[in-house]
Image (spheres, rainbow, N blue to C red):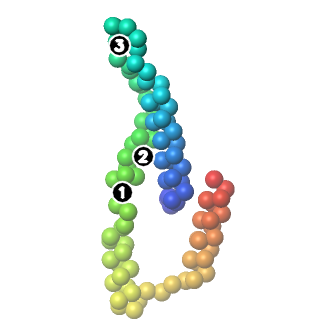
Amino acid sequence: MIISNNQIQNILKVYGEQAKVGKSARQPSAGPAQRKDEVVLSAQAQEFSQILQALRNMPEVREDKVKELADRIAAGNYQVDAKEIAEKMVGRIIADRVR
C-alpha cells in the first residue's frame, strides 16, 4: 500500500480538528462539586489512533532500501524504466487530486 504525503496530511488535519473539538468541549464546571469527564472512544477512533501511532513510529527513510539501491548504483547494476516511473508519477498525481 502506498501512502502519499497528501493522505498523511489529511489524517493529521482530521486529528487536529478532533483535538480542537475535544478541548472546546472541556469547560470548567461552576460549583463546588466537580465531577470528572469520561471519554469513551469508538472502535473507529481507536483504530485511527493505532494507525496514527504506527505512522509516527515509522522511519522517514527506509534505510535497507536506500542501502540496496546505493549498492546497485555503485556496482552499475541499477536499471531504470523511465516509462514505468512516469506512469507511477502520473498515477499518484491523479490519485491525490481525486481525494
Cα separation between marks 1 and 3 = 39 Å
- The residue shown at (51%, 46%) is 13
Residue under numbered circle 1: 58
The residue carrying pointer 2 sits among few (fewer than 14), some (14 to 19) or many (20 or more) residues within 10 Å by Cα, namely: few
Image-quadrant location for residue 65: bottom left
Q: Nearer the viewer, residue 72 or 27?
A: 27
Q: In the figure, 12 relative to 91: above or below?
A: above
The amino acid pointed to by label 3 is: Arg
**First-in-chain label (3 vs 2):** 3
**SS class, disc 3:** loop
**Where does residue 81 sit, x and y in percent of width and height?**
55, 83
Q: In the figure, 51 relative to 60: above or below?
A: above
- The residue shown at (48%, 41%) is 16
Residue under numbered circle 3: 35
Q: Nearer the viewer, residue 33 or 80?
A: 33
Cα separation between marks 3 and 2 = 32 Å
- The residue shown at (33%, 84%) is 71
The amino acid pointed to by label 1 is: Met
Q: Is residue 42 visible?
A: no
Q: Is residue 59 visible?
A: yes
Rendered image: mark on residue 51: 2
